[in-house]
Image: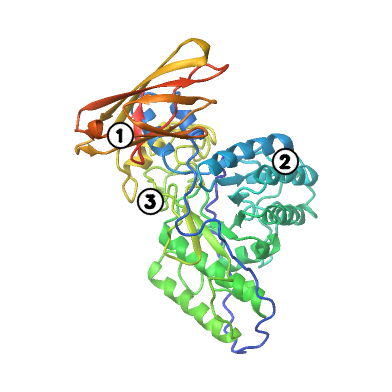
């Protein structure tokens, strides 16, 4: 269900041109106009109360259940990976409608391009160009005039069938089932179509695959982004389903943005762009300032000036990069350092307050806790460093979820509340509910807001022990003067009468107290 972004270190072999033709050709096109007002600072990112994370929690118990509930309290992307045009339209519409009600922006991943992941761990995708275009039309129709951000095809530009790089090398993905003469062109045709369809929507931001700094050189990915239509998109995304440290991605993304800007705004060519491979040394961050200086020189040579308002913006997947990339031991037959590496942690929690005019958001694109694939690193059984067998791609991986939380950087506070929810059906569609809220933390709760979302069409008719606000499925109950204090180890109870026609009453999947996740039975 998720892309497993490869960490194939394809070094750029072209040197940076040190041309001194100041001003020649400057102003030939102005490139990307990234007037993104979707993921602007202060924007709330949607937490889906029906997420795959919270769905997984329903089958778990104990610590594993608490971990999934905690992870599900943070916004992560919703992935759309298959289905007919009508099916994907309905699925997308369901998410964006819920997000609209919550006055938040959903992050939607479109992941259905033919030969995605080159038929590896996350294999699948549409059967051909026409089928993919129809699927994208359904995806776009599902968004309509709603506000949304779209991560378009993870690995879609990193892994292209039968693709020849800027330096003339034929890449490894060479499936016999597709025409080698047309496969790469068709990939760009489909991505351009998708960019046009999504960018035409009134309130949708769309981002193309920018790989990550342990993979393609800046010039190589810039060339691919331009071919895929980045000048009509809001920009690109980095590190989807990978582990590269944020500080490296910040640099890498800014260089890609500069390279696109220079290439579309002047006589500059992507092949001339400095990168993490030259003049910098990829493993030594202290040398990356050399590449910064190369861009200063490139702007001076072209007579252009950096301008974040017109440059391509980017978003960074920080779902699992708190500990940075994994360096495998030497004894692995096949390291697969992108596939569920041990000892990783959550990174920055999702936010649009990045403090960088080029970075629209830090997002959890990959759903943390979901496996990258059943990979044994070249062995018939799990390697001792992995300890347990990895589930198939997209399946819940309790051991990894626990590790990601335990090693999160910055740390993720453990839940400090527990909610027990008991509902009893009565006649005529009414039901009585009792909710117990226990303070499992070490400090008093002084004034509280308990929030959850119903699954069906439940409505609250009256509440005892709080004041209620309901908007669609979303419910908020606020404390009263007499029960606003919950001391450590103590609990309070509230109750309400609800109404539901035609469906059995079910327990909400996530409760939050003052915005923080609670565990629940």
The 10 Å Cα crowd at callout 1, few under 14, some 14 to 19, many 20 or more, is some
Q: Do labels 3 and 1 touch, CB within 8 Å?
A: no
Q: Which residue is mark 1?
A: 479
Residue 111: x percent and y percent? Answer: 63, 44
At x 41% / y 38%, what residue is drawn? Answer: 71
Q: How is the image coloured?
A: rainbow
Q: Is residue 321 visible?
A: yes
Q: Do labels 2 and 3 touch, CB within 8 Å?
A: no
Q: Which mark is residue 126?
A: 2
The 10 Å Cα crowd at callout 3, few under 14, some 14 to 19, many 20 or more, is many
Residue 454: x percent and y percent? Answer: 48, 28
Q: Which residue is mark 3?
A: 322
- The earlier-in-sequence mark between 3 and 1 is 3
The 10 Å Cα crowd at callout 2, few under 14, some 14 to 19, many 20 or more, is many
Residue 245: x percent and y percent? Answer: 42, 56
Q: Residue furthest top?
A: 427
Q: As rendered, which of 426 and 508 lies closer to the eye?
A: 426
Mark 1, mark 2: which one is toward the viewer? 1
Indicate the quadrant containing the C terminus: top left, top right, bottom left or bottom right.
Answer: top left
Q: As rendered, which of 164 and 308 lies closer to the eye?
A: 308
- Whole-number angstrom distance, CA of label 1 to CA of label 2: 50 Å
Residue at disc 3, secondary structure: loop
Left or right: residue 228 versus residue 276 is right
Left or right: residue 492 versus residue 430 is left
The image quadrant of residue 10 is bottom right
- Whole-number angstrom distance, CA of label 3 to CA of label 1: 36 Å
Q: As rendered, which of 274 and 410 lies closer to the eye?
A: 410
At x 50% / y 66%, what residue is drawn? Answer: 358
Q: Relative to 31, does residue 192 appear above or below in the rendering?
A: above
Residue at disc 1, secondary structure: loop
Residue at disc 2, secondary structure: loop
């Amino acid at each position: 269900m998720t892309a497993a972004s490869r960490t194939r270190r394809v070094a750029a072999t072209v040197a940076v041109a040190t041309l001194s033709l100041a001003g020649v050709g400057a102003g030939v096109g102005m490139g990307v106009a990234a007037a993104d007002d979707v993921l602007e600072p202060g924007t709330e990112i949607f937490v889906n109360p029906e997420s795959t994370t919270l769905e997984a929690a329903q089958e778990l118990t104990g610590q594993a259940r608490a971990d999934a509930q905690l992870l599900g309290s943070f916004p992560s992307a919703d992935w759309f990976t298959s289905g007919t045009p009508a099916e994907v339209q309905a699925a997308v519409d369901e998410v964006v409608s819920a997000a609209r009600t919550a006055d938040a922006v959903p992050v939607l991943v479109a992941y259905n391009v033919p030969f995605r992941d080159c038929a590896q761990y996350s294999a699948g995708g549409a059967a051909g160009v026409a089928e993919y275009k129809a699927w994208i039309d359904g995806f776009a129709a599902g968004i309509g005039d709603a506000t949304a951000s779209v991560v378009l095809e993870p690995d879609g530009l990193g892994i292209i069938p039968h693709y020849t790089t800027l330096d003339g090398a034929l890449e490894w993905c060479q499936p016999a089932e597709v025409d080698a003469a047309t496969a790469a062109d068709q990939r760009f045709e489909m991505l351009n179509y998708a960019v046009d369809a999504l960018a035409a929507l009134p309130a949708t931001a769309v981002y193309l695959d920018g790989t990550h700094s342990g993979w393609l050189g800046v010039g190589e990915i810039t060339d691919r982004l331009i071919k895929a239509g980045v000048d009509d998109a809001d920009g690109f995304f980095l590190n989807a389903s990978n582990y590269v440290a944020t500080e490296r991605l910040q640099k890498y993304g800014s260089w890609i943005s500069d390279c696109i800007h220079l290439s579309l705004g002047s006589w500059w060519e992507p092949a001339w762009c400095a990168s993490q491979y030259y003049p910098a040394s990829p493993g030594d961050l202290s040398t990356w300032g050399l590449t910064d200086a190369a861009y200063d020189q490139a702007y001076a040579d072209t007579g252009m000036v950096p301008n974040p308002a017109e440059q391509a913006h980017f978003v960074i997947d920080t779902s699992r990069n708190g500990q940075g990339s994994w360096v495998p031991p030497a004894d692995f037959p096949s390291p697969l350092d992108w596939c569920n590496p041990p000892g990783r942690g959550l990174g920055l929690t999702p936010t649009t307050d990045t403090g960088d005019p080029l970075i629209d958001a830090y997002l959890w694109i990959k759903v943390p806790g979901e496996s990258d694939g059943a990979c044994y690193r070249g062995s018939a059984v799990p390697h001792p460093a992995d300890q347990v067998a990895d589930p198939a791609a997209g399946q819940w991986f309790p051991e990894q979820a626990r590790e990601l939380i335990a090693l999160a950087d910055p740390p993720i506070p453990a839940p400090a509340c527990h909610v027990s929810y008991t509902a009893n059906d009565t006649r005529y569609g009414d039901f009585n509910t009792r909710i117990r809220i226990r303070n499992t933390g070490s400090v008093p709760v002084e004034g509280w807001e308990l929030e959850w979302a119903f699954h069906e069409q439940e409505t609250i008719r009256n509440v005892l022990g709080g004041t209620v606000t309901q908007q669609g499925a979303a419910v908020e109950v606020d404390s009263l003067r007499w029960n606003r204090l919950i001391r450590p180890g103590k609990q309070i109870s509230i109750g309400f009468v609800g109404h539901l026609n035609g469906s059995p009453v079910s327990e909400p999947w996530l409760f939050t107290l003052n915005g923080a996740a609670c565990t629940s039975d």
